[in-house]
Amino acid sequence: MPTNRSKKAARYGALAERAARERYGLEMEHTSWYDAKTSDGTPVEIKAAMLNRASGKTGRFRVFKRYHKKLIDEGGVYVFVCYTARGRGIRIARMRTVDASCLRLKFYGAGGHRESNQAKIPPEKIF
């Protein structure tokens, strides 16, 4: 059973996805490697990270190597969303699209999670 923090993260992530879909006119279509598509069929992976202004700590965007490679192969893009929590909702701080092929990432072992290596990207590397 997920922890309270995990439930909140999932809720906030879903709200960030919805905000990205609305801003960019994306069609929801979840698969293992993307979350939505553009009107011309381009796959889009939406990544969200929380900004915690009180503590000064920020979340990271987690990208998995296997899915990143697939997104590149299919000409896909990322939408990166930074947000702050506001009660049961979120406030979008920043949002940006980036072609997957433009990201140069260093991947490392993820301990078996999703059977792939991962990269954790700090928001300041994107914005």
Image (spheres, grey):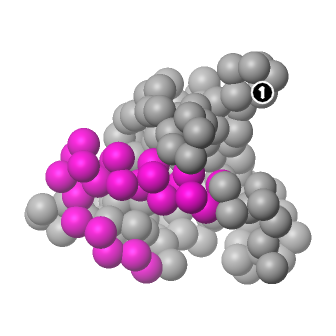
Q: Main secondary structure of the magenta part?
A: helix
* Residue closest to the eye, 57 or 12: 12
Q: Is residue 72 visible?
A: no
Residue 78: where, in percent of width, then height?
A: 41, 50
Q: Is residue 42 found left or right of 16 in the rendered image? A: left
Residue pictured at 51% horizontal, 44% vertical? 89
* Residue closest to the eye, 80 or 4: 4
* Relative to 123, residue 118 above or below: below
Mark 1: secondary structure:
strand
* Relative to 59, residue 30 above or below: below
For residue 42: magenta?
A: no
For residue 22: magenta?
A: yes
Residue pictured at 23% horizontal, 58% vertical? 26
* Relative to 124, residue 45 above or below: below
Q: For the magenta stretch, what is the residue range?
A: 9-31
Local packing at callout 1 (Cα closer than 10 Å; few below 14, some 14-19, many 20+) is: few
Residue 42: where, in percent of width, then height?
A: 24, 63
Q: Amino acid at mark 1?
A: Lys
In the picture as drawn, the residue positioned furthest to the left comes out as: 40
Residue pictured at 59% horizontal, 39% vertical? 87
Quadrant in which the N terminus appears: bottom right
The residue wearing badge 1 is 57
Count of numbered labels shown in the rendering: 1
For residue 75, which quarter of the picture? bottom left
* Relative to 62, residue 80 above or below: above
Residue 47: where, in percent of width, then height?
A: 51, 51
